[in-house]
Amino acid sequence: MLEQRIQQHFIDSADLKYQAAQTLSHPIAAAVQAVLACVTSGGKVLACGNGPSAAAAQQFAAFCVAGFERERPELAALALATDGTLMAPAAGSNDAVQQIARQVRALGQAGDVLLALSVTGNDANVLAATEAAHERDMTVVVLTGRTGGKLAAMLRETDVLISVPHDRAARVREVHGLVLHCLSDGVDTQLLGEQESPI
């Protein structure tokens, strides 16, 4: 029984990835171009999310700085903190909703990219960060699930929405991981040319 349940996870994940491949390839390619335009013009990528999505944001920033599957010059990227260090600024405010947005306003500049991950698209602090990115004239790339939630409604024509067509958080996060790999590989391919897949 347990083994069947485990096998079903693999089957469901594979099915979703297969179904989403065609739907998501266009927005992922648009996201590659946005990141590429940013980093080749001296800009940086600020990545954010909550919980497991924050970990995925850290992973993407690491791929940019340390490389993905091959050696290349470092690309400017930073995962924004979601820990308690920025929760209580000097003014005494304890507004967790603005925690990421403050970092975007402090670090973001016109031409930078905000990579925002949110399974539901309704995380208040990610919404605030997106608003702050728009204030800084940054491009926003959003990875979310199903409809994109409130984040989808906030996006501008120059932004990119990558919305995984599923409601279950685990499945959405699995595809987000693959999307981040596609983004990293796409940027490397555009910068360095095609390469045989490593073994």
Image (cartoon, rainbow, N blue to C red):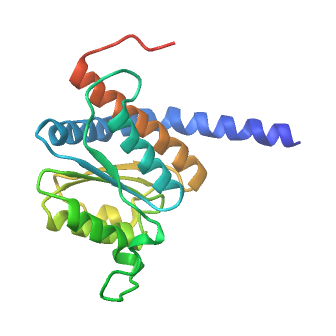
User: Residue placed at 37% from the left, 66% from the top?
Assistant: 126
Q: For the image shown, how many numbered marks are present on the structure?
A: 0
Residue placed furthest toward the front: 90
Q: Is residue 118 visible?
A: yes
User: Residue placed at 28% from the left, 66% from the top?
Assistant: 103
Task: Relative to 154, say whether 73 is above or below.
Answer: above
Task: Relative to 149, say whether 7 is above or below.
Answer: above
Quarter of the image for the N terminus: give it.
top right
> Who is closer to the viewer here, 2 or 101?
101
Q: Is residue 164 visible?
A: no
Which x, y percent locates residue 158?
16, 52
Quarter of the image holding residue 157? bottom left
Which x, y percent locates residue 161?
31, 51
Task: Relative to 180, say whether 156 is above or below.
Answer: below
Quarter of the image holding residue 128? bottom left
> Who is closer to the viewer here, 169 or 53?
53
Which x, y percent locates residue 65?
33, 37
> Who is closer to the viewer here, 25 or 52?
52
User: Residue placed at 43% from the left, 48% from the top?
Assistant: 58
Left-right relation of 50 to 66: right
Residue placed furthest toward the bottom: 92
Which x, y percent locates residue 38?
17, 42
Quarter of the image holding residue 70? top left
